[in-house]
Each structure stands twice: as C-alpha cells, then as structure tokens.
Amino acid sequence: MSKSYRVYTLRYIALGNEPFLTNYGTQYVKYTYQALYNMHQSLVKVGLHNVVKITIPCNADVIWSTVPSKAEFRPDMLGTMKQIVSFLDQISSPFVINIYPFLDLMQQPDFPEDYAFFNGSNHPVS
C-alpha cells in the first residue's frame, strides 16, 4: 500500500514572537536584528530568499499612539525598529504587528466596542 503525502509550501518564517514587549526590557534587542539577518543569509545560501519571507512579529506596544494613523515607534525602540523595518523592506518581507483590540477594550472603558470585535464602525479609529 502506498502512502500519499500532502505537500505544503513554506512561504513565511516568523522569528520569535513579540521580542520587544516592554515587560522584557532590552534583553532581546541586541540579538533580534542579527537573527533576522542570519536567517536571511541562510535562505540566500539555499536559494529560497525570494520564495520564503521572514519577519519578526512585534506586539503593538512597540508603537506609541492613541490611533493607528498617528503611530510612532517607542523612543527606546526607534533605532532598532528603523533598522529592522528598513531591512524587511530591502528584502521584500512584511512588517508584522500583533494587535489585540479586545484587550484594549478591557483596559480602556472608552475604547469603541465595535472596533474591538471588527463589527464595522460608524466612527473609524484612524
């Protein structure tokens, strides 16, 4: 009896998850860009850098803003984030921020409920 296997295409690699949380302090800052760069070099060596894209998912606390359209990187992360975002742009990889609007709803009484649950909004948060 022969087995059949399903073949999946690997398209993205997430290096770590939210390494710049304020709770972590700076313990991962000096390693993160180098890990991103090394992974990209490994993909180049095997010829997959144009097929498999890499990113470092960040928590939304890496930005300071009350609304997305006015977002700026935290002052303590500005240099690191500029370096990472610039490199991601150079290698055509996505910049990823994990958002948790339902947590904002729980922590901020005036946070719009329809925005937290993606039910559409008659008052966009821009």
Image (cartoon, rainbow, N blue to C red):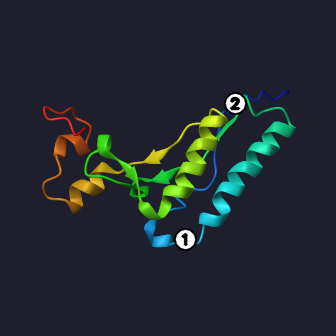
Say what secondary structure mark 1 lies in.
Answer: loop
Residue 13 is marked as none
Q: Nearer the viewer, mark 2 or mark 1?
A: 1
Q: Position of residue 75 (x, y in %)?
A: 43, 61
Q: How many marks?
A: 2
Near-viewer residue (87 or 13):
87
Asked if residue 12 lies left or right of residue 122, the reply is right
Say what secondary structure mark 2 lies in.
Answer: loop
Asked if residue 113 lies left or right of residue 2, the reply is left
Q: Quadrant of residue 74?
A: bottom left
Q: Which residue is mark 2?
A: 8
The residue carrying pointer 1 sits among few (fewer than 14), some (14 to 19) or many (20 or more) residues within 10 Å by Cα, namely: some
Q: Position of residue 44 (x, y in %)?
A: 81, 37
Q: Position of residue 101 (x, y in %)?
A: 30, 49
Q: Position of residue 58 (x, y in %)?
A: 49, 53
Residue at image point 65% right, 36% down? 90
Near-viewer residue (113 or 41):
41
Position of 77 relative to 65 (above/below)? below
Q: Which residue is mark 1?
A: 26
Q: Amino acid at mark 1?
A: Thr
Whether residue 56 appears in this view of the structure is: no
Near-viewer residue (47 or 66):
66
Residue at image point 16% right, 46% down? 112
The residue carrying pointer 2 sits among few (fewer than 14), some (14 to 19) or many (20 or more) residues within 10 Å by Cα, namely: few
Residue at image point 25% right, 42% down? 117
Q: CA distance from mark 2 to mark 1?
A: 36 Å
Label pair 2/1, CB-CB below 8 angstroms: no
Whether residue 80 appears in this view of the structure is: yes
